[in-house]
Image (cartoon, grey):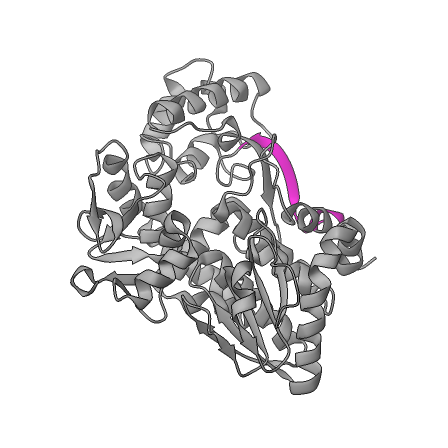
Amino acid sequence: MSLDEAFARVVSEKEASLFRPSASQIGAAAKEYGYLEIVVFPSVDSLLAAAVSARVLKGNGVGFSVRVEPVAPSRLEEPSLLLGYPAAIASELAARRPSALIGYGERPSGILPLAVTAAPDSSITALTLGVLSEIAIIGGLGVYAVMAGYWRGLDRGKRADFVGVENAVIEMLKLENRVEEHFSLRLYRWLDLGTEEALYLTLSPFLVGLTGRREKAEAYLRSDPRLEPLIGKTMGEAPEQAVAVLGEKLYDLLKSTSRVPRRPTEIIGNVYYSRSLVLPDLREAAYVLAHYAGGYAYRLIGIAVDEEGTLSDAYYSYRRAFAGIVEYVEPLIAARLKAERVARMQLASLPGEAPSPPLVEKILRQHGTLGAEEAASFNGRVVLESVLEAYGYSRLVELLRGGCLEYLPGTLYAEVRSGAC
């Protein structure tokens, strides 16, 4: 049984019916024109969806181009695949040739000018792979859906299960032994590394005083006789009782350093590893690739051409920035950031040069340092993905068209133009 046959077995009929209209339009465009224009919202999830789309198209001899745009084009002249925009805008678009939108929210009712695949609790990448599985072999690309789901925080079930299409993707990958599933503490790379090293590497959740502090992580374990047996032990070697104690203590640490409620499943739950990837821990991989895209959005499209080289370069870039991210974030978690009304947004200005704006903002938001309707300003720049989450797509379009924000092409960012709106 092939990987795609396995996927067909675990995808429900409801999900399959969600995929087929877009698959039909993409298939028609490929057959009739041999080309597809991919238009992508500048978010990490959407860029991963574009990367896997490009790889599948390339593997099947279909030409493509990729454009990163914060506002979807109202008129599609070429056969197009729109990724990461709200499904609600589909009725406002005009498409001259076969086209599809894979986005979020609920699909509008009635006859639409293009096919739409959308769901509120699934990543764009997972939906895209579901669509592509109807017309092509997607193989092991499902690991990117898991990464996208982690970045979006969709692992919020009782055992840190995913709540959308990612579940079907994971079942497919498990059937082919592409991923390993473990229920344990959610420490980065703990499958292969000692506990103190895993504590040191874990950026999500950010463990204040332990993340990025190798010596302090070891001292933390030595300070409690119940935890000392964990030193140097991997996930499979760690004594069960000591693991339970560490889980309780880490959750207490997380609660004490956060201004918002934290879920126990942020500390203990399902974790997934892929032995075939340069980045085996898929939770860590999500943050690695988000950091990489933060430097230049189109970098992730390299997955379509040279997967191993792109992932290796991404991890090298992430590791070089890691210490700086920790040094920058840690004091801000406990700080009182003052958000001010700027350019019709609530912006909290962060100091100096942030080493990785997408990661910094994600961590501060998880800890409640940034409010739900606040965005961080990095030297007058904002992460568009965060503005979208805080204010919604319609408001974001207003800010861009009104001159309050100016998109910086090829990036995840926009410049704040407070005097222009």
Task: Decide if residue 116 is on the left or right side of residue 400.
Answer: right
**Viewport quadrant of the N terminus:** bottom right
In the foreground, 294 or 223: 294
Choose top left, top right, bottom left or bottom right for residue 239.
top right
Location of residue 293 in the rendering, given as x and y in whole percent from the top left corner: 40, 61
Q: Assess whether residue 270 is covered by the magenta stretch.
A: no
Residue placed furthest toward the right = 1
Q: Residue at x 55, y 76 (%)?
A: 94
Q: Is residue 346 above or below residue 134?
A: above
Whether residue 217 is visible here, answered yes or no, is yes
Would residue 51 be visible to someone looking at this image? no
| Residue with the most extreme bottom position | 33
- Count of numbered marks: 0
In the rendered image, the vertical position of residue 21 relative to residue 273, given as above or below: below
Q: Residue 6, percent across and down?
A: 78, 54
In-image side of 290 versus 105 (left or right): left
Residue at 43% in and 24% down? 250
Q: Quadrant of residue 369?
A: top left
Q: Hey, which residue is sitting farthest front in the picture?
A: 110
Which quadrant, please, contains the C terminus?
bottom left
Q: Which residues are magenta?
A: 173-185
Residue depicted at x 52% and y 46%: 150
**Along the line of sight, which residue is nearer the eye, 134 or 291?**
134
Horizontal placement of 412 versus 77: left or right? left
Give the x, y percent position of residue 159: 61, 31
- In the picture, measured across the screen, residue 326 lies left or right of residue 285, that is left
Q: Position of residue 93 (x, y in %)?
A: 53, 72
The residue lying toward the viewer, choosing from 108 and 8, is 108
**Residue 383 falls in image quadrant:** bottom left
